[in-house]
Image (cartoon, rainbow, N blue to C red):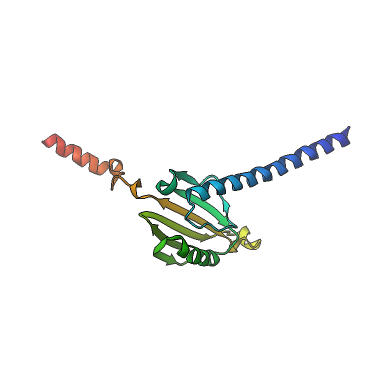
């Protein structure tokens, strides 16, 4: 009886683990399909894994805005070269770049803006396992109509609203 219980437990455990891998693969496949549709004209590294939680996409076609977070097995330098080569043929123009510990590339196309941030992944234990040569890539895309008001956070400035309230009472 004890042997059967151990065998059954091992079978359940292996099923759960293999199911987690399958769910992850399905998520990657479906997410890449959606992102390729929404950002069909923006290059994404083929080796990169899309991170579920920090990724947010709103809108469709040229009206999309959002953030995509990817983990890549390539180094930040290799991803910098990838974007330098792959954006030239896609119509995106480089308007700003900062290359340091953190790489920031800003592209524009038809009024849309895309900011790519490339960071080295892995610290501490990750460096011991060779994970320090991989990258985290964050792509933020904004369409021309996304910003309606230049200072949408004005209501959060309590000092200014208190001053405006005091001035209004004097009138």
User: From the image, which quarter does the C terminus lie in?
Assistant: top left
Nearer to us in this view, 157 or 87: 87
Where residue 37 appears, x then y in whole percent? Answer: 51, 48
Q: In this view, does 141 lie to the left or right of 151?
A: right
Which image quadrant is residue 14 in?
top right
Q: In this view, does 100 lie to the left or right of 125?
A: left
Residue at 42 percent across and 56 percent down: it is: 114
Residue that sits furthest to the left in the current view = 171
Where residue 129 appears, x then y in whole percent? Answer: 66, 61
Where residue 99 appears, x then y in whole percent? Answer: 45, 67
Where residue 66 appears, x then y in whole percent? Answer: 44, 47
Q: In this view, does 141 lie to the left or right of 52?
A: left
Residue at 46 percent across and 49 percent down: it is: 67
- Compared to residue 90, the image places residue 37 above or below, namely above
Which image quadrant is residue 131 in?
bottom right
User: From the image, which quarter does the N terminus lie in?
Assistant: top right
Q: Is residue 49 left or right of residue 142?
A: right
Residue at 72 percent across and 40 percent down: it is: 16
Nearer to us in this view, 55 or 90: 90
How many marks do you count on the picture? 0
Residue at 33 percent across and 47 percent down: it is: 147
């Amino acid at each position: 009886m004890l042997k059967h219980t151990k065998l059954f437990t091992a079978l359940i455990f292996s099923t759960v683990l293999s199911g987690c891998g399958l769910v992850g693969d399905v998520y990657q496949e479906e997410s890449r399909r959606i992102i390729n549709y929404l950002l069909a004209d923006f290059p994404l590294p083929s080796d990169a894994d899309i991170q579920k939680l920090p990724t947010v996409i709103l809108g469709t076609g040229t009206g999309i805005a959002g953030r995509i977070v990817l983990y890549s097995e390539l180094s930040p330098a290799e991803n910098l070269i990838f974007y330098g080569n792959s954006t030239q043929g896609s119509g995106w123009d480089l308007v700003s770049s900062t290359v340091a510990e953190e790489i920031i590339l800003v592209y524009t196309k038809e009024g849309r803006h895309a900011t790519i941030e490339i960071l080295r992944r892995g610290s501490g234990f990750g460096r011991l396992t060779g994970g320090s040569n991989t990258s985290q890539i964050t792509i933020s895309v904004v369409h021309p109509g996304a910003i309606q008001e230049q200072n949408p956070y004005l209501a959060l400035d309590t000092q200014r609203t208190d001053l405006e309230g005091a001035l209004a009472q004097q009138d």
